[in-house]
């Protein structure tokens, strides 16, 4: 259980900056690959622990992130086939899908394939990932920029409203939730200055969280 989320968030922001910088490199070494993999896993584990410790918005785990999805074209790859994953999935055929943040984190932590490449003439820096659970269906792709943006969002998150019992069921709203709902503006990002809203306004903006809860 995380008692103080501040150092975890600070580390998450450092990871986001490191990923953004490495994504812009023209040449990667074996050491670079290790550092990228380490930062991705540390970042995903940090988000999972923050969620499980009730240190984030109640909505964070449900937020949706866009992925590319590449279908399996032959037999299901085995454990030693992961190093040539492109031979088993249609890398030229991609359709968009969405995963929740909770699903995204589990995908990386339990990854069967986790590969990545810096930006090049072929496109932006990209991560290829699939879990053991999904490898018989498809492979996912996501940009470094999208992952870094998620790390930045969680790292900069500030829970500014709480309601309910002081346990993991307490309803928590962040400044990002207020902005997304049109109740505040960044002034500048990631801070919000005017965040006053009546409870009725909050219930109207977040009915799934507050609609059935009596005000404590």
Image: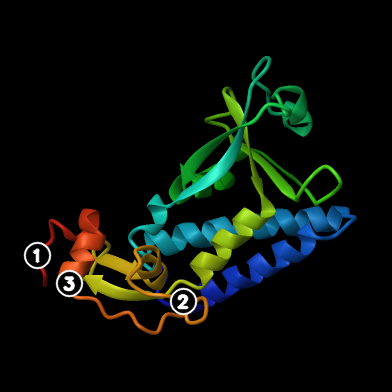
Whether tag 2 and tag 3 are in contact, CB under 8 A, the answer is no
- Identified at 77% across, 23% down, the residue is 87
- Horizontally, is 129 left or right of 200 in the view? right
Q: Quadrant of residue 74?
A: top right
Q: Nearer the viewer, residue 190 or 85?
A: 190
Q: Nearer the viewer, residue 87 or 205?
A: 205
Q: Earlier in the sequence, mark 3 or mark 1?
A: 3
Residue 99 at x, y percent in the picture = 48, 42
Question: Which mark, by number, is residue 199?
Answer: 3
Which one is in front in this view, the residue at disc 2 or the one at disc 1? 2
Question: Which mark, by number, is residue 186?
Answer: 2
The CA distance from mark 3 to mark 1 is: 11 Å
Question: Which mark, by number, is residue 160?
Answer: none
The CA distance from mark 2 to mark 3 is: 21 Å
Q: Determine which residue is flagged by label 1.
A: 214
Secondary element at tag 3:
helix
Q: Quadrant of residue 73?
A: top right
Which one is in front in this view, the residue at disc 3 or the one at disc 1? 3
- Report the quarter where the N terminus lies: bottom left
- Horizontally, is 197 left or right of 192 in the view? left
- Report the quarter where the C terminus lies: bottom left
- Horizontally, is 177 left or right of 204 in the view? right
Residue 89 at x, y percent in the picture = 69, 24
In the image, is residue 40 above or below residue 82?
below
- Identified at 79% across, 53% down, the residue is 33
Say few, some or many: other residues with alpha carbon within 10 Å of mark 3 (under 14 / 14 to 19 / 20 or more): few
Whether tag 3 and tag 1 are in contact, CB under 8 A, the answer is no
């Amino acid at each position: 259980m995380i008692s103080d989320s501040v150092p975890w968030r600070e580390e998450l922001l450092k990871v986001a900056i490191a990923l953004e910088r490495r994504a812009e490199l023209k040449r990667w070494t074996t050491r670079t690959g290790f550092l990228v993999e380490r930062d991705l896993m540390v970042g995903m584990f940090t988000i999972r622990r923050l969620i499980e410790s009730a240190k984030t918005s109640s909505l964070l785990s449900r937020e949706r992130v866009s992925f590319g999805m590449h279908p399996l074209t032959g037999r299901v790859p085995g454990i030693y086939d992961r190093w040539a994953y492109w031979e088993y999935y249609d890398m030229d055929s991609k359709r968009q899908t969405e995963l929740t943040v909770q699903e995204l984190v589990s995908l990386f932590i339990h990854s069967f394939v986790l590969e990545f490449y810096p930006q090049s003439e072929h496109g932006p820096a990209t991560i290829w990932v699939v879990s053991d659970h999904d490898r018989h269906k498809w492979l996912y792709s996501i940009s470094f920029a999208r992952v870094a943006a998620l790390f930045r969002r969680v790292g900069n998150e500030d829970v500014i409203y709480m309601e309910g019992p002081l346990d993991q069921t307490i309803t928590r709203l962040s400044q990002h939730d207020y902005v997304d709902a049109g109740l505040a503006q960044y002034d500048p990002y990631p801070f919000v200055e005017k965040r006053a809203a009546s409870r009725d306004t909050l219930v109207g903006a977040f009915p799934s969280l507050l609609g059935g809860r009596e005000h404590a």
